[in-house]
Amino acid sequence: MCGRFVLLTDLSGIVTSFEIGDVACEYRRSNNIYPGRQVAAVIRDKVNRLVEFRWGLIPSWAQAPSIGNSLINARVETIADKPSFRQAFRKRRCLIIADGFYEWQKTDGPVKKPWFIHLRSGQPCGFAGIYETWISPEGRPVHSCTIITTKANQALAAIHDRMPVIVPRASRAAWLDPENGCREGLLSILAPYPAEDTACLPQYPVPF
């Protein structure tokens, strides 16, 4: 599960880190990004383009945008075959930019303990995502996305059993390439991020 994340790195740092060739959106930073918000993402269209998507995937065949409320995450175990995701997985992949994400740990009491998870390097990361364009009854295009999740690595496992897929820098080009149709190769990218490169910090209060 990934339900809240953070993006505070300035635009110049994102352009450098993700080799952005075209900034095609208004870049927004926030320490509280939640479903339904616009999120910064990278797609490949001759060059790496920085764009915005609504978080919560609305399939092109959907009758109403409300379906996106239940499609904020896609499990790696079903991403290639589930009807809501399979076409986008083949052709419309993206990286959703973040500096880290929040997760809540169950405790013996009624209140869960919040944690902030990020890369030990301090660098921004790209969550594996897919995107779609839905046309509203008024003819307005709505571009939306979902974040792919996998099982938690050993650093996070005691906090939660799932985590967003963080695409390693060396695999970003292959993930973004819309001509890359190798199912097994793409699925091999969607692995838990190495535990030794992941930091988990207690976070209280969470800035909501």
Image (spheres, rainbow, N blue to C red):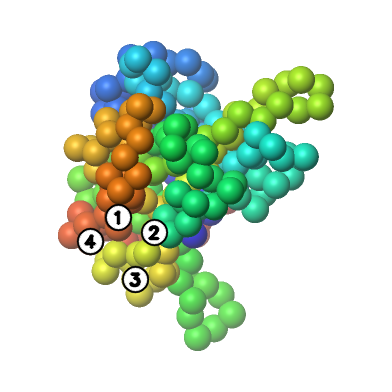
Q: Residues within 10 Å of mark 3 (few under 14, many from 20)?
A: some
Of the numbered discs 1 and 2, the one sitting upstream in the chain is 2
Number of disc labels: 4
Indicate whether 125 appears above or below 190: above
User: How far is disc 3 from disc 4 in space, using C-alphas?
Assistant: 10 Å
Q: Which residue is mark 4?
A: 195
Q: Residue flagged by tag 2: what amino acid is it?
A: Thr
Q: Is residue 67 left or right of residue 133?
A: right
Residue 201: percent from left, percent from top: 33, 61
| Residue 8 makes an appearance in the image | no
Q: Give the amino acid at mark 3.
A: Ala
Q: Earlier in the sequence, mark 2 or mark 4?
A: 2
Residue at screen point 47% across, 56% down: 78
Task: Give the mark toward the camera: 2 or 3.
Answer: 2
Is 161 above or below relative to 11? below
Place of residue 21 in the rendered image (x, y in percent of width and height, measured from the top left): 33, 14
Marker disc for residue 157: 3
Earlier sequence position, callout 2 versus callout 3: 2
Q: Residues within 10 Å of mark 2 (few under 14, many from 20)?
A: many
Foreground: disc 1 or disc 4: 1
Binning the other alpha carbons within 10 Å of mark 1 as few (below 14), some (14 to 19) or many (20 upward) gives: some
Viewer-side label of 3, 1: 1
Q: CA distance from mark 1 to mark 2?
A: 7 Å
For image coordinates 60% across by 41% down, the residue present is: 57
Disc 3 and disc 4 in contact, CB within 8 angstroms? no
Q: Are marks 1 and 2 in contact (CB under 8 Å)?
A: yes
- Toward the viewer: 28 or 131? 131
| Residue labelled with disc 2 | 150
Q: Report how far apart the C-alphas of labels 3 and 1 lie in the structure.
A: 14 Å
Of the residues shown, which amino acid type is indicated by label 1? Ala
